[in-house]
Image: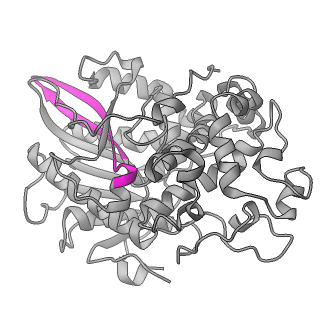
């Protein structure tokens, strides 16, 4: 099994503070008109966002998704009745990424290191970090839950930013982003997802997602009989014959993980003929990277409907936004680290985005997609006596992931300013700290937060 490369970063466990070497640790809204068509032609990479006028960068808190990982279910089926496996939902066997289910891939680790190098150069240029050498103690903080792919992602960012520097330590807090049940109801969350989908999954599947679903159907081919039976379809089924109803997302839910897995394959450097069995360009009539972005509209839409409705977002996102807000508060008051990194998950980033009513479309991706290894930067700027908060989303494009493109100011990652409408952002997308704190505090349900875990 291929393992990510790890250098000298250390892990500080939250329970007891015992140090472990990473080497030993190895192992209701209406849906808006969906911009699927915009994936056909995307603008060239834009320059990085300009800073707020007459302001100085004081701190940044990054909420990041982990890097590229293996499928979260097994690739191979344990037997003919197994349906929790990728091979069950395709005619041909899936490529093996040589990593345990859900773990960071070796290429995923490398791409996150590349993002770390970018953050170091970008924030050094802004005067926040030293351009060379190791950071002073207490000036950086890396936090993660205890999931392998997030801890490894935080370590990769540290390695990319501060190679060879042992002081960059990672604090692992098991279940960091989880809180009390706080009355969360799956049935109510399902209704909220359906409402955000416009009231009917059928309308979504026959409308904006019709073509991406048809193309995925052609790529995946016939499912295994057990998968057909589990979905309530005839034994000879494919994505096109999976039952769907107003309340049942059917093929949209089934196609979500395969679509994103094509991104993980290509982003990880697989040859074109191995990605989606070499079928995507012919089926879509698009170059491979563009075709991957196009069919990932299914994945991005399914996840958006699941995790961004206000009900679900507040219940599940409160224990995520709470520690971010505390880190921002400490930075504004001058007692926190200038650079804080939270390694997290795509659903949690969507939860926070739902709480703050954020929207985005990054270069090469579907609207609302959360790319692997990308992060929302909560930047703290000082304008005279007024602290400002500006959110910027950074992520490698699909082609940059595949090529492991070095990232610079002249060749930057995709970037987009996210302006929370509830805090009255200015022309640069920045809100006053007072307005942002008030908005975030109003959205956080403290009954869903475990303050001890979030400290």
Visible residue check, residue 60? yes
Q: Is residue 42 left or right of residue 349?
A: left
Q: Residue at x 70, y 50 (%)?
A: 217
Residue 324 in the magenta stretch? The answer is no
Q: Residue at x 18, y 71 (%)?
A: 165
Visible residue check, residue 68? no
Q: Is residue 323 left or right of residue 337?
A: right
Give the number of marks: 0
State the predominant SS element of the stretch in magenta.
strand
- Magenta range is 375-399
Q: Is residue 45 left or right of residue 215?
A: left
Query: Can you give x and y, in whole percent of width and height, for residue 63 in the image?
Result: 38, 46
Q: Residue at x 31, y 18 (%)?
A: 425
Query: Can you give x and y, in whole percent of width and height, for residue 445 in the image?
Result: 55, 32
Query: Can you give x and y, in whole percent of width and height, for residue 392 in the image?
Result: 31, 36
20 or 366, which is in the foreground?
366
209 or 58, which is in the foreground?
209
Place residue 156 in its image quadrant: bottom left
């Amino acid at each position: 099994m291929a393992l990510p490369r790890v250098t000298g970063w250390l892990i500080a466990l939250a329970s007891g503070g015992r140090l472990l070497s990473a080497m030993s640790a190895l192992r209701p809204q209406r849906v808006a008109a969906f911009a699927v068509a915009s994936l056909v032609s995307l603008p060239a990479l834009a320059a990085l966002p300009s800073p707020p006028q007459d302001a100085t960068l004081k701190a940044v808190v990054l909420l990041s998704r982990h890097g590229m990982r293996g499928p979260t279910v097994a690739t191979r089926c344990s037997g003919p009745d197994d349906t929790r496996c990728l091979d069950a939902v395709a005619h041909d066997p899936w490529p093996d990424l040589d990593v345990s289910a859900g773990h960071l891939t070796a290429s995923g680790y490398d791409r996150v290191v590349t993002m770390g190098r970018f953050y170091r150069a970008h924030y050094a240029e802004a005067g926040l970090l030293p351009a060379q050498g190791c950071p002073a103690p207490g000036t950086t903080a890396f936090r993660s839950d205890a999931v392998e792919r997030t801890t490894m992602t935080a370590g990769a960012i540290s390695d990319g930013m501060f190679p060879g520097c042992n002081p960059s330590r990672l604090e692992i807090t098991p279940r960091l982003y989880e809180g009390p049940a706080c009355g969360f109801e799956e049935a109510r969350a399902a209704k909220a997802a359906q409402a955000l989908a416009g009231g009917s999954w059928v309308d979504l599947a026959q409308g904006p997602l019709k073509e991406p679903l048809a193309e995925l159907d052609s790529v995946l081919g016939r499912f295994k009989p057990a998968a057909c039976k589990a979905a309530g379809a005839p034994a000879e089924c494919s994505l096109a014959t999976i039952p769907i109803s107003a309340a049942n997302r059917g093929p949209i839910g089934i196609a979500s993980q395969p679509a994103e897995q094509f991104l993980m394959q290509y982003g990880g450097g697989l040859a074109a003929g191995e990605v989606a069995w070499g079928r995507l360009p012919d089926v879509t009539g698009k170059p491979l990277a563009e075709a991957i972005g196009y069919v990932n509209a299914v994945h991005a839409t399914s996840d958006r409907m699941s995790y961004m409705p206000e009900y679900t977002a507040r219940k599940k996102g409160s224990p995520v936004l709470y520690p971010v807000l505390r880190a921002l508060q400490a930075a504004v008051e001058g007692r926190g680290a200038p650079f804080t990194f939270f390694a997290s998950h795509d659903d949690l980033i969507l939860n926070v985005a739902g709480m703050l009513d954020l929207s985005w479309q990054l270069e090469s991706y579907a609207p609302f997609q959360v790319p692997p290894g990308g992060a929302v930067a909560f930047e703290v700027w000082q304008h005279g006596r007024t602290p400002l908060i500006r959110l910027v989303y950074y992520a490698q494009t699909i082609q940059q992931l595949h090529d492991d493109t070095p990232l610079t100011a002249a060749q930057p990652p995709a970037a987009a300013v996210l302006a929370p409408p509830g805090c009255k952002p200015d022309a640069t997308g920045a809100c006053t700290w007072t307005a942002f704190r008030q908005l975030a505090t109003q959205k956080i349900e403290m009954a869903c937060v475990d303050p001890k875990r979030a400290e």
